[in-house]
Amino acid sequence: MRHAIIGAGPTGVVAAETLRAQDPEAEVVLLGDEPEPAYSRMAIPYLLAGRIDETGTYLRHTPDHFENLGIRCIQDRVSHVDTDSRRLSLQNGSELEFDRLLIASGSHPVKPPIIGLDQPAIHHCWTLQDARRIMQHAAAGSRVVLMGAGFIGSIIMEAMVQRKVKLTVVEMADRMVPRMMDQTAGNLIKRWCMERGVDVRTSTRISAIEPDSSGGTRYRLQTDPAGEIAADLVVVATGVRPAIGFLEGSAIETRQGVVVDDHLQTSVEGIYAAGDVCDGFDWNTGNRAIHAIQPVAAETGRLAALNMSGCNTVYSGSLAMNVLDSIGLISTSYGQWQGVDGGDAAQLLDESRYRYIKLQFDGERLIGAITLGLTQHVGVLRGLIQSRIKLGGWKPRLVSDPTRIMEAYLAGMHL
């Protein structure tokens, strides 16, 4: 039995190790398309900030870790999957047969349609090679423009602040972290960042990037409505999409990502998908969703591997969940933080102290939440949403004072 895994990120690594533990006699092949040891993209901002070196991004720190487990590693890109012959075509021209396959190819950064984006010192921040290039230009005092104030952009922002650059953040939406925070929270994060020296420009679109003929800086960015912005370095963080291009022409069903069932199996028997590429079930809504966060990636990798090895394991779906540190201000969002039609909401706001909590209800159940500056509620909110407890008399108490979430959770656990 040969298990092949496309993708050597956290999903693929956890899956490979799980397969080896479950099926000691099987052949396990892990394919990664970068010339690096398996590493975590989420560690790259810590590398940029100078908190770790490159080895700190590695997922496993023993050089012969995979060899000792009998996991074969191939560093090459998969160009095509032939589901009939059960073969992978690799970019180097070779092929690899498989019995069972896990697609854990993750995401790739979105390149916005902006004139002048293909110039030196304009980089995505997605790979270790990207990080090396960014660090060449992000010296203290240099002018850096960060395109995008979403989750990934906000993490990169933290690293740029640590490097003491002159940072301008440009975001098309009307607030920071728009897919995670409502208007109130997003604007509070913006104000917090501006008070700490970051020039944040929301509702702003970059139309072109031109060389600076004056010689003062490298580039001039044309923006609407903010006018020109000078930059020595431009970092692009305008979102990601599942990396599924190599599946074109295969029998594997794709929508936003790779469609899976409740065992993480695709439309083709014996082929599974997990991680950022996985178009699976949202635990909270029952609808399909892609939750591109590392804990979900690792867990789906583990569950897919269990099913590949013959251990029947149901995937109940993942919960939308994000925790973000914006220069020391912690924000979180869970589940259906936007609320649902006919649902109720409760909120408490202290703008001067950057404290905010908003709860969303569907009937007597808590279904979503946003918090800002209230880290004590992080685990409790997740637990209360996932428990699906009917709050009963605790709902009006939470509407009156949303900070009583711990009491409501403890009371619910004793019902």
Image (cartoon, rainbow, N blue to C red):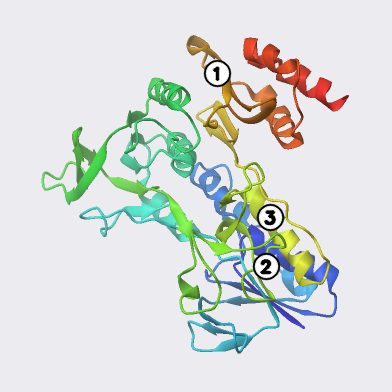
| Of 382 and 154, the residue lying toward us | 382
Q: Residue at x 28, y 57 (%)?
A: 120
| Of 367 and 328, the residue lying toward us | 367
Closest to the camera, between mark 2 and mark 1, is 2
Mark 2 surroundings: few (<14), some (14-19) or many (≥20) residues within 10 A: many
Residue at disc 2, secondary structure: loop
Residue position marked by numbered label 3 in the rendering = 298
| Image coordinates for residue 364, horizontal then vertical, percent | 70, 25
- Please report whichever mark, 3 or 2, sits nearer to the chain's N-terminal start: 2
Mark seen at residue 265: 2
Q: CA distance from mark 2 to mark 1?
A: 40 Å
Does 327 sit above or below residue 276?
above
| Image coordinates for residue 335, horizontal then vertical, percent | 61, 37
Q: In terms of image quadrants, where is residue 398? A: top right
Does 324 sit above or below residue 310?
above
Mark seen at residue 122: none
| Image coordinates for residue 415, horizontal then vertical, percent | 87, 25
